[in-house]
Image (cartoon, rainbow, N blue to C red):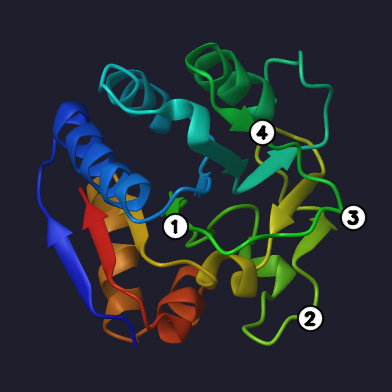
Amino acid sequence: MADVTIIERASDEAIADWLAARFSEALDGGDGPVTITVPGGSTPFPIIEKLLEHDLDFSRLVVWPNDDRIVPEDHDASNTGKLSALFEPAGAEVVTLTIMEAVPHFDLAWLGMGADGHIASLFPNTDPQLDEERRIIRLTPDPLPPEAPFDRISLTLPSLLDSAQIAFVIRGSDKRTVFDDAVSGQSDLPVARLLKGASQPVTCFT
């Protein structure tokens, strides 16, 4: 089970500062690319905007979406399109998820979580497994979220766990209860399965 640090009531700016410090450490740790995976949804983008204000060598940053809706990248629902619009002007590379893509070891896996305990597009109905052999999968949430009724492509639990550290940003008391139950081992939701398999540091911002 993961060793989880919870940082309460963190502002977008404070989270961006924390992320910048982690990226700076990774940049200083070698000469190669720094590879991260980031969530979609509305929460990350204001944080990313604050992060990009930091003086870092973003040309060495490779950004993988945790998941995406299977839509064109210029569609409003595309995580990849939104991430590209933010990161690429700063010099970073944004990867488009495909089944054939070789998933790397991540310096940081930044995750969100739904009120149903899903992470990436690993919804409860998809029954994600820690011993999943595939690194990227296509799937269909059931029920389909009305705000994004699309099939998905997603990193799997082993892909997300192949990371030096994990960070969650979780907003709202309903989600906090779900996360706390997962941390304490009182659920078998996708987030609980991930935490069960995590041996690296996990930081959760609320």
Q: What residue appears at the point 35 percent right and 21 percent down from the top-left corner?
A: 52
Q: At 21% across and 43% down in the image, what residue appears?
A: 21
Q: Quadrant of residue 77?
A: top right
Mark 2, residue position: 133
Q: Quadrant of residue 196?
A: bottom left
Residue 106, percent from left and from top: 52, 59
Amino acid at pointer 3: Met
Examine the rendered structure and indicate whether residue 57 appears above or below residue 140: above
Mark 3 is surrounded, within 10 Å at the Cα level, by few (under 14), some (14 to 19) or many (20 or more) other residues, namely few
User: Which label was assigned to residue 5?
Assistant: none
Which tag is nearer the camera, tag 1 or tag 4? 1
User: Which tag is nearer the camera, tag 2 or tag 1?
Assistant: 1
Q: Quadrant of the N terminus?
A: bottom left
Proximity of marks 1 and 4: CB atoms separated by less than 8 Å: no
Residue to which mark 1 is pinned: 107
Q: Nearer the viewer, residue 81 or 171?
A: 81
Closer to the camera, 202 or 172? 202
List x then y, in percent, for residue 138: 84, 55
Residue where numbered disc 4 is placed: 146
Mark 1, other Cα within 10 Å: few <14 / some 14–19 / many ≥20: many
Q: Are marks 2 and 4 in contact (CB under 8 Å)?
A: no
**Total numbered circles:** 4
Residue 100 shows which numbered tag?
3
